[in-house]
Amino acid sequence: MSDQTNTSDTKALADTIKDLHTPQIITVTDPSSSGMGAIPFAVVPKGMAAQSLKPYFDEYRYIPERKTGTAKVQDLDSFGLHVNRYKTPSSIIFCKRTWAAPKNQPRTYADAVAALAHASDLWTMPTLTAVLDYHEQNGKDGGPGTPQWGQHRTAYTFPLSPQFLAWTTFNAVPLGQSDLAQFFEERALDVAPPPTFTADDPYAQNADFAALLQRTTQLLKGSWASPMDVMDMSRTMRIHESSTVENSARLSSGQQNIVYQTEHTDGQGQKFVPKDLFLIDIPIFLDGTPYTLPVRLRYRIDRNKVVWTYEIFRLDLCINHALNAACDTVRGLTDLPVISGHPEMPGKL
C-alpha cells in the first residue's frame, strides 16, 4: 500500500512539473492605444525570471512609440537643418569643449609623414549634441515641466582642416634642409604676407592682432619673413659655422678668461641673420574661417648639417576662439541655447 502511494505521488509530481514546463499559447492585449488589439504569444519556461513584453509589442507596431536615435552629421549646416527639422520648444544643445592634441609627438620627418595619414584620429575634438526631446522647463508657477526621454539627438564632432593637421603634425619636428624644402613647397599657399607695421599694414584693421604681432617682434627680437623669404631659406640656404676660443691670463693674480665664440655665415661669407618669424593663414576646422597664426623658425648645426624646426604660437587660443565662433553660428542657425557640458540622461536605455 505504501509503495502504491509513493508511486501515485511521484506520478502526480511529474505531471505537475510537465504541465509547468509545457509551452503555452496565451493572448495578450496591447495596453497602449496603438490599436494592435490582442496578440498571441508562445510562453516557453526558462527559469522563473520576469521578462518584459515590450519588445514583442514593438514588433507589431505600425509606427514607433516615440522618436529615438542619434543622427551623426558632418558639417554645421547639416547640424542646423536636422535640429530645425525636429526641435521642440524644450530642445537644447550641449557642447563638449574638451580637446587634446596627440599624446605622442613625431620625432623625425618620416614619423611625421606617417602620422599625417591618420592625424585626424589622434586628436580629441569638441562635439555638439542636440537633445531634441529634452525635459520641459519648469512652469512660471514653479511647477515641474513634463520629463522627456532625451533619446532623440543630433551629434556633430568638429573636424580639423587638412591645413591645420599638416602644420600641427610637423610642429617642432626636426627637419633637414631637403625635408624643410619639401614641406614648405607643399604648404606654400598657407604662408601669409608679413606685417609691415605701417599705415598700409594688411593687419592694421585688427588692432588686437596687430598689437600682438608688434609685441611678438619686440619680445623675440625677430624679423618677419615673406612667403618668398621662407621658400628661399628652405631651398638654397647654406650656413657655415666657425668657432674660436680666446684664452687670456693675468700673471699677477693667476686669473684666466676663456671666451668661446661661434659664428654662422651664409654662402657669401656674410654673417647669417635669419628671418625667423612668419605667418600662416589656415582654418582650424574643416571649411572654417582662416586664422592668421605666428610661427617661429629655428635652426641649429648638427654634424655640419642644418636642422630646422618651427613652432606655432598659442594654438590653444585659436582653437578656443574658433569653437566659440562655431557655437555662435549654431545659436544663429537653430535659435536654441548652447550649454557647455553633456546631457544628464543617456542617449539610449
Image (spheres, grey):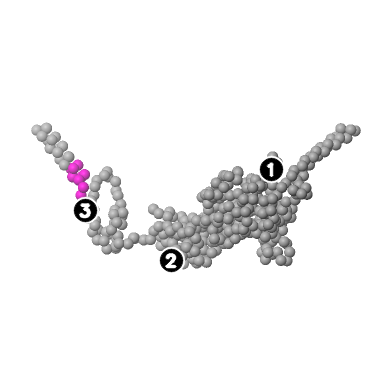
The quadrant in which residue 59 appears is: bottom left
Name, please, the residue furthest toward the left: 1
Mark in the foreground, 3 or 2: 2
Amino acid on which disc 1 is placed: Lys
- Give the extent of the magenta segment: 16-26
Please name whichever residue, 173 or 1, is drawn nearer the observer in this view of the structure.
Answer: 173
Q: In this image, 235 relative to 120: left or right?
A: right
Please name whichever residue, 309 or 134, is drawn nearer the observer in this view of the structure.
Answer: 309
| Residue 85 numbered tag | 2
Residue at the location (69% across, 48% down)?
298
Give the labeled residue for mark 3: 26
Expressed as whole percent of the image width and height from the top left, the position of residue 345 reads 44, 55
Residue at the location (28% across, 58% down)?
60
Expressed as whole percent of the image width and height from the top left, the position of residue 340 reads 53, 57
Mark in the foreground, 3 or 1: 1
The quadrant in which residue 64 appears is: bottom left
| Quadrant in which the N terminus is drawn | top left
Q: In this image, 180 relative to 15: left or right?
A: right
